[in-house]
Image (cartoon, rainbow, N blue to C red):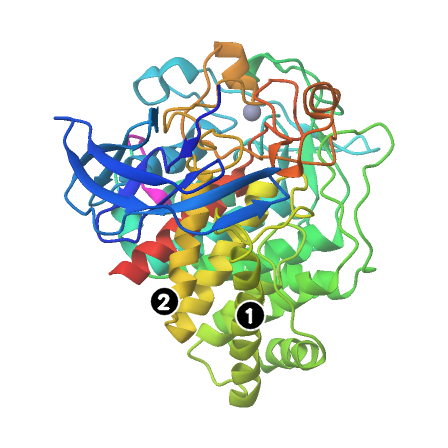
């Protein structure tokens, strides 16, 4: 029996606005109960009724902002009770640590000792040299993080992941000192990925190989058991520009701590950018015989847009500025995904200390606010308070939902409109359990847990690795398991906690990094 009362199953920051959801019809009175002693601490009436077509339900918002004494609580409506949740300061700190630790646990190419990795410990994996596709040439492509539920390592999502993490550090610098029970702090962890990325740049041309993986996906065993030949897929326009952009960001962070490394990154970034300008701007497609993650992309303007803005911010060369400004005057768009990276470009341009076109800067800020305003329209259309409608539940829907919230936070930073922050928080609550699927989409956290993520180490050890953000509902039903379990479901409920539902129950590096960025933005706003 699904819960009638949905809450953020981790909890609420004591000073934040607080909402739960009652899934049912009619007038409703609710009580907030102290789970420790059973006493009622608040009584209220539910808000207006929403008819939510995306979730196929009617529901009402239960608002209890006044409850701000730290403790454990539940909500009661008649005989119905919610799961218990916390109200606390730093309520998401443990979740944040676990989401950060995930990157360490995804490390490829070195031993993960029990001391840090627990049941996910394993000897070094994927340590052989990799064949450059269709050649007799082999290169060292070891290291980096496994991308997702599989063991491939791909440049495009890697670049976006580290970009999210750098922005998180920009918003909440204290993340750089947070100890989350691994041998590395965050900047060292990101460096582990960058050292691998550097290996994928062709030293002669400066172009960057799209990915390294086996030709196909392996069975559900630990990574060191995957013994097929590693293949380096051809270079691509998108991987080369994303590499240039993300390494330009990295320069700013490593300069103060390791100037020699920063210099190496700067050279690699500039070389990649120059190489990309000589490449044909076409999307990547898997070469014949390789079927792992494609990360193909047909919209190719945004990669140049992002890279030009980051290289101008990092290096100050006027040619980057001109390329960005010419493109921005034609078309301002948004997006934090691996496919659409416009927002990274916008942020780089409006945050650089270098000279910029102030008129254009104003136009970009206004465009960010306008987009946030359109998201607010969606947020007001449902009781969950999220910027989604029935068409929004596509593959990786949780990522888009989190990124919309990040956009609201970016707009909040510029405008200080409180409603942007409040609605961004609703997106956090959605991920942590206040959603139509009645599950916390962060493994290991909450009460209704995801148990069978599409993630090979979790499957091999028969226990979901904690700290992973799940893909979420996909009404496109892109795998046989989803078709079997979700046919006929409303879009927001096209989710199934089954290992083989890769289209709804997988995990990725850049879903975790997106959530880390969102929490860092909220942290910064609350400071
Ligand atoms: Zn590996």
> Is residue 128 in sight in this rendering?
yes
Residue at 55%, 15% in the rendered image? 224
Which range of residues does the magenta coloring cover?
A: 181-186
Residue 269 placement (x, y as % from top left)? 58, 60
Q: Secondary structure at mark 1?
A: helix
Count neighbours of disc 2 (C-alpha within 10 A) and say few if under 14, some if 14 to 19, many if 20 or more.
Answer: few
Q: Nearer the viewer, residue 215 or 141?
A: 215
The reply to whether dot 1 and dot 2 touch (C-beta < 8 Å) is: no
Q: CA gap, disc 1 to disc 2?
A: 22 Å
The reply to whether the residue tagged 1 has its Cβ within 8 angstroms of ligand 1 is: no
Residue at 31%, 38% in the rendered image? 30
For label 2, the residue is: 418
User: Secondary structure of the magenta portion, mostly?
Assistant: loop
Q: Secondary structure at mark 2?
A: helix
For label 1, the residue is: 346
Q: Is residue 390 left or right of residue 43?
A: right
Extreme residue toward the front, this view: 27
Residue at 58%, 49% in the rendered image? 400
Residue 367 placement (x, y as % from top left)? 58, 75
Counting every numbered tag in the picture gives 2
């Amino acid at each position: 029996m699904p819960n009638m009362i949905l809450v953020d199953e981790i909890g609420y920051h004591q000073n934040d606005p607080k909402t739960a959801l009652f899934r049912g019809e009619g007038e409703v009175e609710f009580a907030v109960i102290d789970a420790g002693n059973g006493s009622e601490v608040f009584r209220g009436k539910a808000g207006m009724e929403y008819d939510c077509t995306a979730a196929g339900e009617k529901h009402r918002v239960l608002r209890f902002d006044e409850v701000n004494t730290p403790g454990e609580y539940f909500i009661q409506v008649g005989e119905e009770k919610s799961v218990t949740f916390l109200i606390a300061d730093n309520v998401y700190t443990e979740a944040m640590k676990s989401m950060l630790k995930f990157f360490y646990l995804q490390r490829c190419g070195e031993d993960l000792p029990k001391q840090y990795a627990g049941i996910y410990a394993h000897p070094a994996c994927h340590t052989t040299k990799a064949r450059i596709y269709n050649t007799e040439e082999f290169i060292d492509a070891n290291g980096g993080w496994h991308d997702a539920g599989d063991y491939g390592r791909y440049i495009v999502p890697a670049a976006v992941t580290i970009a999210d993490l750098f922005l998180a550090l920009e918003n909440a610098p204290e993340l750089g000192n947070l100890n989350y029970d691994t041998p590395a702090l965050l900047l060292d962890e990101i460096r582990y990925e960058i050292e691998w990325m550097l290996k994928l740049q062709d030293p002669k041309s400066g172009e960057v190989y799209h990915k390294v993986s086996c030709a196909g996906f392996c069975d559900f065993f630990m990574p060191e058991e995957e013994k097929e030949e590693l293949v380096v897929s051809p270079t691509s326009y998108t991987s080369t520009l994303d590499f240039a952009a993300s390494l330009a960001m990295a320069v700013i962070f490593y300069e103060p701590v390791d100037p020699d490394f920063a210099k190496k990154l700067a050279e690699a970034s500039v070389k990649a950018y120059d190489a990309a300008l000589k490449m044909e701007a076409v999307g990547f497609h898997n070469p014949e015989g390789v079927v792992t993650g494609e990360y193909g992309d047909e919209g190719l303007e945004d990669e140049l847009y992002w890279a030009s803005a980051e290289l101008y911010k990092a290096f100050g060369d006027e040619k980057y500025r001109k390329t960005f400004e010419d493109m921005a005057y034609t078309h301002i768009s948004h997006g934090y995904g691996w496919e659409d990276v416009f927002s990274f470009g916008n942020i780089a341009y409006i945050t650089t200390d270098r000279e910029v076109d102030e008129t254009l800067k104003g136009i970009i800020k206004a465009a960010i606010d306008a987009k946030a305003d359109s998201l607010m329209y969606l947020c007001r259309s449902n009781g969950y308070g999220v910027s989604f409608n029935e068409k929004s539940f596509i593959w990786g829907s949780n990522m888009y939902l989190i990124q919309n919230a990040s956009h609201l936070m970016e707009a909040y930073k510029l405008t200080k409109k409180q409603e942007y922050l409040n609605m961004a928080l609703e997106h956090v609550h959605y991920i942590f359990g206040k959603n139509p699927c009645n599950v916390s989409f962060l493994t290991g956290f909450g009460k209704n847990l995801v148990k069978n993520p599409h993630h090979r180490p979790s499957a091999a050890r028969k226990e979901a690795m904690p700290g992973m953000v799940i893909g979420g509902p996909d009404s496109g039903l892109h795998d046989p398991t989803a078709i079997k379990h979700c046919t006929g479901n409303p879009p927001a409920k096209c989710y199934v906690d089954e290992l083989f539902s890769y289209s709804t129950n997988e995990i990725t590096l850049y879903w975790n990094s997106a959530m880390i960025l969102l929490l860092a933005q909220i942290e910064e706003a609350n400071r």
